[in-house]
Image: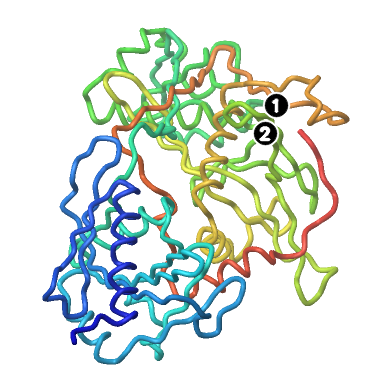
């Protein structure tokens, strides 16, 4: 008499349930059929919003059990040991292979790529019960496996539409006039000693090829000592700002940079070597907090932070300053400022740290997308000259509230509305695969000892 074992029934039942679950999540499961030899089928990913098939697939092997614990099962995880022959077969596949485990007693379904075995224990898969469930949140990570790893670059197939992209650009409103004059000096560096002999200490001007250019009228200031006053004239800014001459573009970029540095000098300092604007420390070894509005809600950031030596608690290790590297671009006839968040490290809040580059590299490795986005919003708020509502309950007791940057007669910075993208990037799919990721996260969570004094601006 022919028979069908319970294991056969469970296997067929589990594969059917997995197929139904995948299709319910908006994707297509194609079974291999009766000639299955270790791969039960494939999942082809589909954009649930448009219905478009992506042509990206992963191979699937379903393992079903009726009940019972998995190996080393706890509330948060369990293990599964793959057979040597199965692993060798799956590794030879032209498609990435995932293992899906289905337990009928609690209807739990978990998944894992067969290539995720630990180094030296490739057969052993460790499942996380929170992150490795086969649910809507898993589909972006599954889709990421279908990308051709042999090609240059990386791409995660989009699974959603309509995401807003916040640009790190700000539009620059230029003054109507710009002041131009002849100079006895060939370049600005040659004129500095003469200028310093006067009481003038502002450097929002450019001398290039014996020509002086500035948004600020030099008449009645120490700048008269470095120009031929009789040749001074005010011309339309567009004559230089819109010029196609590469030399004029260089002059414009340098003038914008120098003008902005002077404009924000009470709040931000300029580090010449790294070409970075960064928050000034109020005093030596003193922290500073800046309050701003991030999109809609008031928030704050410790923009100057003091770190102590972990072994010698009373010895300052370094002082970290939030900053950004400005870059100026002309796009479609308009000038824009590009904000690239970064950090500057000092010895005491003023002197550049001797290992500043190494400290910056370590901090950059720990930065995440949310942190960088928040810094862009913070500097955007600062440069627009905005101020927070003093009545905001979040900042009760803090004075002054916010910090306005003067823009009279100089540059005005305007925010740009976010752009709606046709597709969205699933951030959860950009999982960290670096074997040092856990160590880096632990170091980031632990953090160095922090100074207790604060100054709110």
Residue 128: percent from left, percent from top: 51, 70
Quadrant hosting residue 448: bottom right
Residue at image location 29% in from the left, 62% down from the top? 16
Residue 209: percent from left, percent from top: 33, 30
Residue 39: percent from left, percent from top: 21, 74
Residue at image location 57% in from the left, 44% down from the top? 323
Q: Nearer the viewer, residue 157 or 46?
A: 46
Q: Nearer the viewer, residue 392 or 222?
A: 392
**Do the CB atoms of the residues marked 2 and 1 lie less than 8 Å apart?**
yes
> Where is mark 2, residue-wise?
267
Q: Is residue 93 left or right of residue 78?
A: left
Q: Nearer the viewer, residue 310 or 148?
A: 148
The vertical placement of 71 against 369, above or below, is below
Q: Is residue 278 left or right of residue 135?
A: right
> Where is mark 1, residue-wise?
403
Quadrant hosting residue 378: top right
Residue at image location 70% in from the left, 26% down from the top? 403
Q: Earlier in the sequence, mark 2 or mark 1?
A: 2
Residue 380: percent from left, percent from top: 54, 30
Q: Nearer the viewer, residue 70 or 351?
A: 70
């Amino acid at each position: 008499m022919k028979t069908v074992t319970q294991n056969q029934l469970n296997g067929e039942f589990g594969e059917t349930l997995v197929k139904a679950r995948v299709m319910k999540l908006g994707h297509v499961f194609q079974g291999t059929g009766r000639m299955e030899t270790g791969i039960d089928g494939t999942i082809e990913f589909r954009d649930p919003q448009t219905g478009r098939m992506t042509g990206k697939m992963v191979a699937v092997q379903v393992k079903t059990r009726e009940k019972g614990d998995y190996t080393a099962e706890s509330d948060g995880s369990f293990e599964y040991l793959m057979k040597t022959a199965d692993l060798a077969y799956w590794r030879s596949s032209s498609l990435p292979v995932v293992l899906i485990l289905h337990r009928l007693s609690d209807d739990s379904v978990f998944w894992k790529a067969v290539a995720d075995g630990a180094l030296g224990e490739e057969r052993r898969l460790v499942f996380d019960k929170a992150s490795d469930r086969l649910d809507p949140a898993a589909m972006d990570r599954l889709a990421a496996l279908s990308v051709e790893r042999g090609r240059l670059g990386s791409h995660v197939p989009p699974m959603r539409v309509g995401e807003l992209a916040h640009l790190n650009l700000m539009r620059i409103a230029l003054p109507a006039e710009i002041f131009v004059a002849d100079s006895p000096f060939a370049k600005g560096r040659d004129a500095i000693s003469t200028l310093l002999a006067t009481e003038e200490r502002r450097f929002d001007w450019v001398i290039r090829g014996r020509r002086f250019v500035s948004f600020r009228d030099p008449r009645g200031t120490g700048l008269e000592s470095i120009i031929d006053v009789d040749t001074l004239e005010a011309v339309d800014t567009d004559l230089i700002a819109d010029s196609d001459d590469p030399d004029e573009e260089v002059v414009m970029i340098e003038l914008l940079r120098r003008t902005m540095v002077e404009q924000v000098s009470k709040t931000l300092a300029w580090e010449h070597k790294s070409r970075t604007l960064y928050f000034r420390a109020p005093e030596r070894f003193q922290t500073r907090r800046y309050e701003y509005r991030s999109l809609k809600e008031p928030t704050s950031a410790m923009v100057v932070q003091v770190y102590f030596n972990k072994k010698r608690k009373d010895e300052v290790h370094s002082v970290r300053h939030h900053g950004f590297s400005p870059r100026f671009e002309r796009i479609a006839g308009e000038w824009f400022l590009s904000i690239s968040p970064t950090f500057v490290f000092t010895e005491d809040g003023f002197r550049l740290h001797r290992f500043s580059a190494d400290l910056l590299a370590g901090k950059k490795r720990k930065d995440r997308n949310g942190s960088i986005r928040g810094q862009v919003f913070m500097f955007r708020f600062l440069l627009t000259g905005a101020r927070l509502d003093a009545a905001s309950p979040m900042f009760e007791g803090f004075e002054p509230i916010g910090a306005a940057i003067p823009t009279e007669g100089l540059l005005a910075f305007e925010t740009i509305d976010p752009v709606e993208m046709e597709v969205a990037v699933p951030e959860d799919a950009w999982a960290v695969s670096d074997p040092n990721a856990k160590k880096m996260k632990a170091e980031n969570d632990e953090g160095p000892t922090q100074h207790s004094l604060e100054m709110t601006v």
